[in-house]
Amino acid sequence: MLSAEEWQVVALSLQVAAAALALMALPGIACGWLLARVNFPGRALLDTLIHLPLVLPPVVTGWLLLAACGRRSWLGGLLWEWFGVRLVFDWKGAVLAAAVMAFPLLVRAVRLAIELGDRDLERAAATCGAGPWRVFATVTLPLAAPGILAGLVLAFARCLGEFGATITLAGNIPGESRTLPVAIWTWTQVPDGEPQVWRLVALSLLVSVLALAGSEWLARRLRGRMGLE
Amino acid sequence: MTLTLDCTVARGGFTLRTGLRLGAAATGIFGPSGAGKSTLLQLVAGLVRPASGRVELDGTVLDDAAAGIHLPPHRRRLGVVFQHGLLLPHLDVAANLSYGERLVPAGERRFARAQVVELLELGDLLARRPRQLSGGQRQRVALGRALLCSPRLLLLDEPLSALDRGLKRQILPFLQRVRASCGIPILHVSHDLGELLEVTDELVLLDRGAVVAQGALPAVARDPRALPLLHDCGLANTLRGTVARHAPADGLTVVDLGGGRELHCPLLDAPPGSAIALQLRPEDIAVAGMAIPDISLTNQLPARITAITPAPDRVLLTVDLGQPLLVEVSARTVHHQGLAVGATVWVLFKAMALRAR
């Protein structure tokens, strides 16, 4: 049904989105918690920095990432020399671009879920002898889990749709950085490419709907297990 | 147990000032809403920090503002029961019970789980989630969770006030059971004086962030500043006795107060010989120079006046019935009948004015 090229595009999109999610899950939860609970100097700065990709044109974010991570830049040079990691024109660059773009959505969802949590329950757990880390792991996190899950799904969907920053940083290389949106755009530039565009648009719809349905199923199971439903 | 609180807590525009030394097996913290009762409890639990001063429990400094010492809640080894239970909704009852227990080293645990489950009759609830429990069951689980923390002190923050009257009556015996059998000192906050009198033996009366009086109820009630507050908060006598016999034809139960004194109360559902506590409001008691026959004041007992406390709008008499009994009368009654300390009067009250909780 699908051509080898189409398989490659779908597989790469899922791989990039999954890797981006894995990359940002822990920092996203940590930042969400930090912004929800801790008043520290530089809080506003961190908040702004995290949210910047949400308001900047994606191509600007991509350009700034390119400037920061190119082989000749300080950071890019370190990554190449120490880890042999190349980001520009590489699928790992697509991962970074997707993660940076989706990060604010994840942080916002986590922050909201934690802010909505009942702090009295945390206090009750503390009076039972649980220290701050244990309270976080056994009360805050499980109670915020449905909201965090929703944030992860949103972020995953955003990663699947990432275009501007991805193409700026990682280019449009089949098998490396040609994800679904990039492939769709490519075919729109080809004369008589319209049927192919429609096939990819349908694929994109299918992947998104499946991701949404899967997350809904997971969320319901989670709420059931937590005794919230 | 000795708990000393000598500090101030500032919260918004409200300041709590305490200079207290508590040593009773069970102390009731009592006062109108906004008096600072819960703040006092949170101070002991470590959930709020004092602005100045010290908190010390059995020689351990819990807080010392000047020295910058604040022992966080999880290191205080206390058991707290909150007004709404605050059970963890994502854990079943068994996991809620063991939440604190697991954090106590095995050698320092004071109770076996089975013992607490039996004491509080939790056996049938262990597999349930908190949201599947009634309010009363929730509070029993919360009490069990607190006990299994092997606390040095049990803090009860309005544990019954979210429950209706019927449920309260069901939970009170459990609190009394805990008090009698667990050997853990209790600090019990409530705005319901009747509830406190059944569980505690000493009262601390708070009003607008200050300690107004401290001691057993009869002593506290003799403080003229305390009386209006007590009155507003449902001041009631607790008469303790044993069921002597039932008189179903009269609709009455006869209760033996000891010392040859008997009184009648509405028919009780308790076997003869069982201990009973009856509540009687001070304003429901009449004072006469002699017994009066042919009147519906069924209970008529002679008693000696031991104290007379005048307040602006009423006078509180303390009389001796083998146990102290508080009686509210008007100043007019005092002049008119020539009431004086040492005199013997008859106290009269209807059987129907007595209430078993």
Image (cartoon, coloured by chain):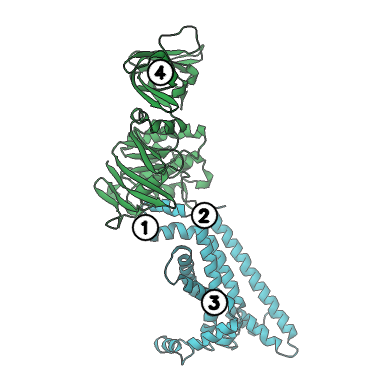
Chain colours: A cyan, B green
Quick check: B260 left or right of B285? left
For residue B153, which quarter of the picture? top left
Q: Which mark is residue B334?
A: 4
Q: CA distance from mark 4 to mark 2?
A: 64 Å
Which amino acid type is marked by label 4? Val
Among the two numbered marks 3 and 1 on one chain, the one whose residue lies closer to the N terminus: 3
Among the two numbered marks 2 and 1 on one chain, the one whose residue lies closer to the N terminus: 1
Which amino acid type is marked by label 1? Gly
Q: CA distance from mark 4 to mark 3?
A: 80 Å
Q: Residue furthest left?
A: B59
Please tell me whether mark 2 sits on a helix, a strand or a loop.
loop
Whether labels 3 and 1 share one chain: yes
Q: CA distance from mark 1 to mark 4?
A: 60 Å
Which amino acid type is marked by label 3? Leu
Residue closest to the eye, B43 or B145: B43
Which amino acid type is marked by label 2? Met
Residue closest to the eye, B199 or A134: B199
Residue that label 3 marks = A52
Residue that label 1 marks = A131
> Which callout, 4 or 2, points to the residue nearer the camera?
4
Provide the chain ID for the residue under circle 4. Answer: B
